[in-house]
Amino acid sequence: MKTLAIIPTSKPYYEQGFSAPLGWLFSRHIGQVRGVYSFELTEAIVGEHDTFIIELNWYAVTYEFGLLVDYVKKINPDARILFGGLTAQLHFREIFQRYAVDYFIKGDNELPLRLFLDGVPPREIPNMVGRDFE
């Protein structure tokens, strides 16, 4: 599994860089997870990955989140997309209805994210929600 974590390009992210918590979350999978800002995406980068984690922390980037999901799925229709963040926690059911995303982690994400990146089937991961399971 080659995973790409995508951070929308709202001003606070871009000026302050990737957050320490994101770096910590992916530290066990350094060779497997790459992080980019959304403005860095290219067809080649999307084509190199099969799994995507798209952050949706702030409501203000919801429109961009939708554009990112559409872009990934257009280039890589079989891509698996996991989304997360504060706004995602509050509106995950609506996000599943509106966007072609596959998975979400409800509540604590440290262990579920590690298991997901380790290849554990999503239905077996605690706190994992999918289009057809919770």
Image: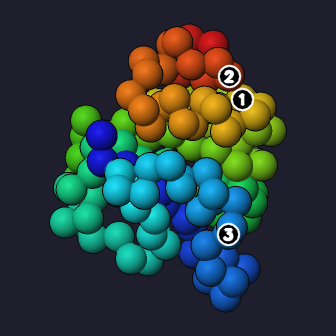
Three-letter amino acid code of the residue under disc 2: Asn
Residue shown at the point (27%, 58%) measured from the top left: 46
User: Of the numbered discs in the image, which one, if any, rests on residue 106?
Assistant: 1
- Label 1 environment density (alpha carbons within 10 Å; few <14, some 14–19, many ≥20): some
Mark 2 and mark 3: Cα distance apart in space: 23 Å
Q: Quadrant of the C terminus?
A: top right
Mark 3 to mark 1: distance in Å?
20 Å
Q: Nearer the viewer, residue 15 or 131?
A: 15
Check whether the beta carbons of the residues at disc 2 and disc 3 lie within 8 A of each other. no
In the picture shown, does residue 14 fall above or below 63? below
Q: Is residue 73 left or right of residue 100?
A: left
Q: What amino acid does circle 3 point to? A: Ser
Q: Position of residue 12 (x, y in %)?
A: 72, 80
Residue pointed to by mark 2: 127
User: What percent of the width, then of the height, locates residue 18?
Assistant: 61, 73
Q: Nearer the viewer, mark 3 or mark 1?
A: 3
Task: Name the residue beneath numbered marker 3.
Answer: 19
